Amino acid sequence: MKCVNPLLLAGMLATAAAGANELNQVMDKSAAINESAAKSQTKIDGIADSMQSRLQKFKTLNKEIDGLAVYNAQLDKQIKNQLDEMAAINASMDRVSVIERQITPLMLRMITGLEQFVNLDVPFLPEERKNRIEQLTDLMDRADITSSEKFRRVLEAYQVEVDYGRTIEAYTSLLPVDGQEREVDFLRIGRLELLYVTKDGKKAGYWNKDSRKFESLPETNISQINKGIRIARKQLAPDMLTLPVQAAE
């Protein structure tokens, strides 16, 4: 059996220990490098994720900017249209002021003309028609009613007068008959005839357009006048009437 030199063995052991130590250091450094690399990779991944997120936000913002550009362009068109409309309204208001200054004298002339027409017309419903004209005259002095409403009322009064010419109507009123005021039933046939019969059915008459006064009619006309009154009041069906008619001029 060979004997190993103790010094050689100690050297070999020392060398082995040194090698192991260096190996451990290398492994430790390798582990540190791996750990550092892992941390770096994590940072890189984080930066990449951050960049991706920022890129996505950038794209989103670009889309919003594009949308806002379209929206602003539309708003510009709307604002321009509104400005044009405001200019048109202002011009219309100026024209309305001119028209209003012109329409008031026109309405006054129309009311005067209507009053003259009623005074010259067949004298049916005298109080009602007179009151309507007085109301129009009072209406013209009121500041709380617009010119358009005043004009509507004037036209409405004209329309009422027009309708009188194509309708038949019966109403009761007072009339001087033979020097005595009596209650009579009137029968108006358009503007063609205005007839009356007393309540006792004994007297009848008509409005003479030439003499402009009421004149008597023979008793033979009374039954037909009464029939016409009942037709006007819808108490009888429409039927032929035999009544005196003044010849047209």
Image: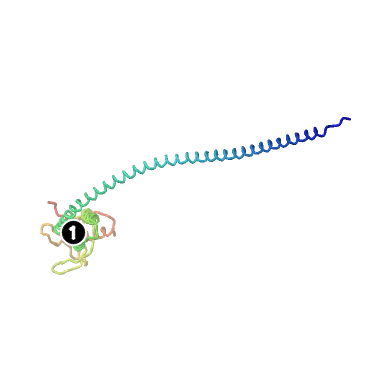
Q: Which residue is at the front of the view, 133 or 11?
A: 11
- SS class of the residue under badge 1? strand
Instruction: Give the residue at x 47% y 40%.
Output: 58
Which quarter of the image is occupied by the N terminus? top right
Residue highlighted by disc 1: 194
x and y, in percent, of residue 135 in the image: 21, 61
Q: Please, is residue 170 above or below residue 89 in the view?
A: below
Relative side of 50 to 107, left or right: right
Q: Which residue is at the front of the view, 92 or 20?
A: 20
Please identify the residue farthest to the right as the structure is shown.
1
Instruction: Give the residue at x 69% y 37%.
Output: 25
Relative side of 168 to 246, left or right: right
Instruction: Give the residue at x 26% y 54%.
Output: 239
Q: Looking at the rendering, which quadrant does residue 149 occupy? A: bottom left
Relative side of 47 to 247, left or right: right
x and y, in percent, of residue 59 in the image: 47, 39
Q: Decide: few, some or many residues near mark 1? Use Cα within 10 Å; few <14, some 14-19, many ≥20.
A: many
x and y, in percent, of residue 209 in the image: 13, 57
